[in-house]
Image (cartoon, rainbow, N blue to C red):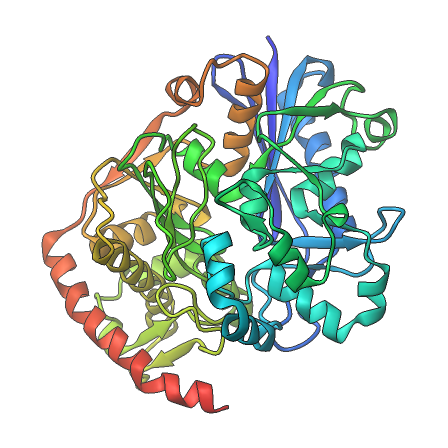
Amino acid sequence: MKYLLGIDFGGGSSKATLIDTLGNIVAENNVEYPTYYPNLGWCEQEPADWNRAFSENVAELLDKAGISSEDILAIGLDSATHTWVMCDEAFRPLRPAIHWTDSRSRDQAKKLKAEYGDLIFEKSFHKPDTIWTLPQLVWVREHEPENFRKLRYIFFEKDYIRYSLTGVYCTDYIEAQGSMLFDCNTNRWSKELLDIAGISEEMLPQVVKPTDIIGSVTKEASERTGLAEGTPVICGTTDTVMEVFAAGAVQPGDVTVKLATAGRICVITDKPYPNQHLVNYAHVAEGLWYPGTATKAAASSYRWYRDTFGGNYEELNKGAEKIAIGCEGLMYHPYINGELTPYADPLLCGSFVGIRTTHTKAHFTRSVLEGVSLSLLHSKKTLEELGISLSGRVTIIGGGAKGELWRQITADCLGLELVKTVSSDSSLGSAMLAGVAVGVFATPEDAVKACIKVETVTVPVKENTEKYEKLFEEYVAVHDALMPIYRAR
């Protein structure tokens, strides 16, 4: 039997999935790495931590599977869009990577929007915000001129890790779309946007297809990782499209609801929907796109809550199960890193509102889960207002989807039947994409048929959906009341 390896790099950990050529998951493994917050609003990671996590993941995965690395046909990597590394002429990082959730470039994004907003939107399909590479580049230019002067190469996260495996410098067109340096109309780096950033095209990687085999594991990388020298490595792409792919969403109208570091609702369409409230990216299935809405801190809200107030997810969930919908007036807003849909406002803050002496830790726990799900309802309503049909199968994905309670809260909030597959991790999508690249699967649709298996279906309770609709009105009203306070700080 031969195998396909996919490895994802998410907000705080790397997940590896190994599948066989029949589409069965053989082994999975997860390795965490730190995120650093050196200043208010900053969010950074060390590229060396990614490479360490990669090597640990491969060793542990091969041990779990009990196979030889010689039997791996191909490798695919994915990572969060917008997370980038600036390197010198020797391809050495000049500073820690700026994570996509970093919000230090607020002033730069605001100025870019005022001076070049129409041009940037026309080229990139998005408006300037702190999540994009362009405003972050401008911040570095203004605040770290010495690093900017030494800048010779810009990597995106999975491309840096893959370069360490193969020595090949490139990226894919979906990743490029997430940089705000790429013309989404012509599929080329935009000279106008590069001029705004103050960089040249020579600093950016060649753009290829996600399924292109760009190189193979070098001798040095083989010794470091345990992978077989010469194993083909595909370009790969971003984590969100790989999650969409791994969820089986390859037909127009299919929907994914994501409970991961960020929360997202994506809908498969046959064209982009450029709009200030949406994030538009191409799909790996030819001719399709997956415009989506996003809440910035979904599972990361729950992780922050766990890490700050203590406990483990199992005991926290058990307590929250006993609390009624609405948490007896306690409400949480998940704006701990600002918010995306529909506000695109980095100044928003998280909040617990309506606290009384009768509230217990279990009330606070459930309010976190409900607050994130209500933010996703805001995303759903935004899509519907734009006339985008959520007509196909709805699959819930991400680490937060593992919890039965949170799945039910989300189904009830959205009023949607949620399908959970055996795995929808982006690392599975990368393994599937590697299979498409080497001909194990003829098309992405064939990969879905072979690999995607339904585990459970969560049906919304109509009475609960009605309750959440009323709570949503209060949820928006609290935001409206607090927003002027946050902006005045």
Image spot of residue 284 (x, y percent): 47, 31
Location of residue 229 (image quadrant): top right
Q: As displayed, is residue 244 above or below residue 119? A: above
Give whichever of 176, 131 is nearer the camera: 176
Position of 286 with respect to 135 (left or right) is: left
Give whichever of 230, 156 is nearer the camera: 156
Give whichever of 276, 100 is nearer the camera: 276
Q: As displayed, is residue 145 above or below residue 57? A: below
Tell me the residue at 32%/47% (across/down): 404
Can residue 35 be seen by looking at this rendering? no
Tell me the residue at 35%/49% (across/down): 273
Position of 364 with respect to 435 (left or right) is: left
Residue furthest to the top in view is 1
Location of residue 8 (image quadrant): top right
Image spot of residue 12 (x, y percent): 61, 53
Location of the N terminus by quadrant is top right
Tell me the residue at 50%/61% (across/down): 119
Image spot of residue 141 (x, y percent): 74, 69
Tell me the residue at 15%/70% (across/down): 470
Q: As displayed, is residue 240 above or below residue 483? A: above
Q: As displayed, is residue 381 above or below residue 257? A: below
**Total numbered badges shown on the rendered structure:** 0
Image spot of residue 152 (x, y percent): 82, 52
Can residue 335 be seen by looking at this rendering? yes
Location of residue 467 (image quadrant): bottom left
